Image (spheres, grey):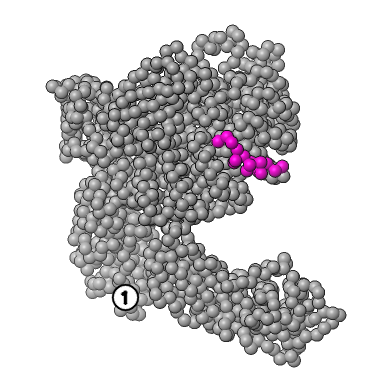
Amino acid sequence: MVCSVSICAGEIFELKAELNSDKKEKKKEAVKKVIASMTVGKDVSALFPDVVNCMQTDNLELKKLVYLYLMNYAKSQPDMAIMAVNTFVKDCEDANPLIRALAVRTMGCIRVDKITEYLCEPLRKCLKDEDPYVRKTAAVCVAKLHDINAQLVEDQGFLDTLKDLISDSNPMVVANAVAALSEIAESHPNSNLLDLNPQSINKLLTALNECTEWGQIFILDCLANYTPRDDRESQSICERVTPRLSHANSAVVLSAVKVLMKFMEMLPKDLDYYGTLLKKLAPPLVTLLSAEPELQYVALRNINLIVQKRPEILKHEMKVFFVKYNDPIYVKLEKLDIMIRLASQANIAQVLAELKEYATEVDVDFVRKAVRAIGRCAIKVEQSAERCVSTLLDLIQTKVNYVVQEAIVVIKDIFRKYPNKYESVIATLCENLDSLDEPEARAAMIWIVGEYAERIDNADELLESFLEGFHDESTQVQLQLLTAIVKLFLKKPTETQELVQQVLSLATQDSDNPDLRDRGYIYWRLLSTDPVAAKEVVLAEKPLISEETDLIEPTLLEELICHIGTLASVYHKPPSAFVEGSRGVMHKRLPLGGDIGGSPAMGAGFGAAPAVMPASLNAPVGGGLGDLFDLGGGVGMPMGAYIPPKTVWLPAMKAKGLEISGTFARRAGVIQMELILTNKAMSVMTDFAIQFNRNSFGLAPAGPLQVLTPLGPNQTIEVSLPLSTVGPVMKMDPLNNLQVAVKNNIDVFYFSCQYPISMLFVEDGKMERQVFLATWKDIPNDNESQFQIKDCHLNSDAASSKLQGSNIFTIAKRTVEGQDMLYMSIKLSNGIWVLAELRVQAGNPNYTVSTGTGEGRRTTLLKEREI
Amino acid sequence: MIHSLFLINPSGDIFLEKHWKSVVSRSVCDYFLEAKEKALEPEDVPPVIHTPRHYLISIYRDKLFFLSVIQTEVPPLFVIEFLHRVAEMIQDYFGECSETVVKDNMVMVYELLEEMLDNGFPLATESNVLKEMIRPPTILRSVVNTLTGTSNIGDTLPTGQLSTIPWRRAGVKYTNNEAYFDVVEEIDAILDQSGTTVFAEIQGVVGACVKLSGMPDLTLSFMNPRLLDDVSFHPCVRYKRWESERVLSFIPPDGNFTLMTYHVNAQNLVAIPVYVKQSISFFESGSGGRLDVTVGPKQTMGKTVEGVMVTVHLPKTILSVNLTATQGSYTYDNGTKLLVWDIGKLNPQKLPNLRGSLSLQAGAPKPEENPSLNIDLKIQQLAISGLKVNRLDMFGEKYKPFKGVKYITKAGKFQVRT
């Protein structure tokens, strides 16, 4: 669709002649023509030398035009671009600050390596220029240079100069320095470029009042990254930011909202100021909705987050979200979403009246969403369910095809929320069976028929009618039909035997869909072996669905609140999930409020610093061995097996608010999994259970997970789970990988963790000397391996006793040429022996370990991988 | 920050591109053009589009798409606000914002864009500052320039850019010093079938045209500032004074600007100046229907309602209309299915009425959707919220300026459901 525009040779020739003309006017006109061609995408790079020749001039307009050209084409003609350098350097010394600024600004836009070298000196001068206009231009130039050559900027110390500019006397310089630093910091997430302290915060707040609207956005976004020391500082920053809520520029307003939403978190809720602030937030958000539709869209996406976090702010403003006829569709859909979030018992009548109105609009997508919204209201506001159902029935009466289908899908959900309450409407639904042509609606209808088969007289006929075209249905419908007919059979076994036979054979014999076939077989076996059990399984009572299903998960919401006004807030995804340019974004968290305790210090009491791993050793056990040495350090320490510090295995973000961290330990011959469960969600968690996947050493829980009391929000519990090694075995990769499933009342979560092999070393691992000698000789060479443990300052005896604590037993020791050789044995829980030779040279902190096992192939694997 | 800008006309041609960092190939616009194809109306193109390597943020304004390309996390509102500034700048410089105007002044637009952003960071977006650096074209000046060889580009440092009042240039001089304020209120409302207000609010704007010499410091006060609980100000307004005294105190920009916008919210009762009695019905058989619309004055505070216009979005299956209007005239466009009835001034003694029959395409079923009516109207010398300016004082300068305030009420998004 987009084609490049070509320019003919004759035209180029003409321009060339004009550019080389003696007359200034003619020259300028020619450059203008060149620029005009450039702006529409024509390629005029062939004129490069001729245009650059016009650069040395007193005429500011001509100079600016040539600069424009240079910025566009210098990259394609790097050698020619050097010609321009002298003029640039000279202009940077010009008496007129406008020229100085223009030169340094243009030079930064020329993305040619050779030029950047020459740029450094002029830039350094301009950063310290007496004129603030030049300084502020130079600040941006540092960001440009960083983009071209980051190393150069660091080497030249420009970053420090830039940091100094944050304390500049001119607010515009401060704002630009902040903007430049923020941009640079985005590519260096851990560089601490914007290291904010109360002094610099004060400078920023002062500049905030005086700089341009754009500068205010930069400063506010930067402020949002600061974490105040206490609630008093938080309040004073909020007080100084609030006036920005009345700014005409919507981006300033939203950035201010971000700062306030974040810092509010730290204010005690009983503070008067807290209430005042809440009240002040509503009007600016409402005002954003009277702006241009594009601004409205971004504002609505953000409001969606804000109403989930703090519904009280906009609870009285429902009406501003009513959809107007000429809103663009993307605004309409967003407004609808927020209306449902704000729906409550107090305003449900209004909301329903509106939704019913929308359901008769022209736009199909919008109508569908409106119908769905009615269903969501029913599930959210229990008192309104009845009205919602009758509204939906009214809509079904319109017989508009897509409205009917959408209504049936949501009625199914209403049944799932309020079972045995609205079944009287089933008859009406059944009337519309024939008009359903969308899989989702068909599946919903079939589910309803199956679920309430005992109340529908002709349920078998209805389901049979679907069966005719079984193979043309989508999988969703097929699966649903299978289940529904089995339900029907269990409820009315006498009349429907034939039907169930038919569907089971269709599903198992004629279908190549594995899901369908598997489900078919399961039902078949269940029905043929134990019909009572089948009844218990298929007709079991199902948990009710809840309104929370469409809420954003709390940890993600917290992160998104910290990103209000950014692309992340438009996409409702954390920046790490989609921003390509942000290399390793740090997750932002809301500060903890005064009344919420800090999370328990992780790994406290496990003092050992992580071991320094030998570089050649990536295998976990090698690392584990290194760890074994490192523990304690002194001989007087109590002996015991090494326990690695606890790490987070399951972050709360992935598990709807449940965070699990843990470690493994061997205590008194029993392997234990020590877990810390933390509830970071808003609701109480109960019914915990745990299971392992098959693993290399047959680890399995020896008892149930002992979480007896429900886990309230922000509560933490420590449990230790004894493990046995008699479970099913399957080789994992890496060998010590363990896949775990944890269940609670909310969901089932999966994670995997790695255990130190050392916890599998059993107490009776001391081999007889003779056996050791014989075995050592028998170990084939391929089964042997060697590695070094570096920086271990223990003598051989200390090492030996230390290792014994972890069930690594010294069998013999001999000294050859000042080297202590320790021979040791280890027995794994599955009966495999591992033998090792440890060489310790006095004074040399590096140990050499040779290991080997005598067993067959499997141990070879173990050894190669692990030791 | 903002990487590139493309201007695209409704048929999808890119007619201007500007890059503030490295050059981005214009093929990036294909993602946008694809989204544009999908959208039913140009207004429906989503403003933020995600492509594998860039983000495209666009606005649709004056029948043109302004499309910006960004590569890193940049606040989208920042970009959208900036794009609107670009459109306003073109409007301000050349009198209108259209493809022809941009094409005719390609180089100047390009120079202006270069001044507005540096490396994607906003540099000079205040029209006063820009005009000091690049003078807007006038017929006289272009003649003079050709004769004398002087240029449009200023070679002094724009002073406003450095002071703490970047919106005002220094050394302003007028022989006639005058300050005019326009209070414009738009009613956004949704009325239901029976005429009950579902939702109504007032969007107000205080626009100003200030031509005063030197550095005047103005104070504008209202009779009833209590009405204004939700306001946003031009950066020149001193917020502290407003907080404590409820007066607008400011050093104005030179020329036209928006001093304040405000919002009178649904909680306060909003007066609805007209009522609409309508019935649009279709026969069950599906061959056609009837339309009957009457408009009359309601709460007009004793003023005349002018410029009344009713727009009906008729269902797609309508073939033709046959109507008679007792006042004004109507037009019907069969392509867009828009029925526009231009009434003009509302006469309370003789209410205007439009009635007649609608015919449907042969075989078409009874339309499913309800048409919706949009109303346009104007009331001179009235701010429907009741807002009134009390007085305007000037400090800092000795001369006596001419002062004036004008009020006008209009319909914004004023919709009647059927």
Residue A283 in picture, x, y percent from top left: 35, 41
Instruction: Check disc 1 and report the residue beneath it.
Output: A536
Residue A16 in picture, x, y percent from top left: 68, 18
Give the image quarter of residue B407: top left
Bounds of the magenta segment: A156-171
Residue A829 in picture, x, y percent from top left: 60, 83
Which quadrant of the rendered structure holds the C terminus of chain B? top left
Q: Chain of mark 1?
A: A
Q: Is residue B287 left or right of residue A178?
A: left
Report the number of numbered marks. 1
| Residue positioned 53% across, 71% down in the render | A662
| Residue positioned 59% across, 71% down in the render | A645
**Local secondary structure at mark 1:** helix
Inspect the magenta stretch and tell me whether residue A784 lies in it.
Answer: no
Q: Foreground residue, B392 or B64?
A: B392
Q: Is residue A832 visible?
A: no
Residue A1 in picture, x, y percent from top left: 51, 33
| Residue positioned 52% across, 21% down in the render | B170
From this view, report whether residue A113 is shown above or below residue A758. Answer: above
Q: Is residue A148 left or right of residue B347?
A: right
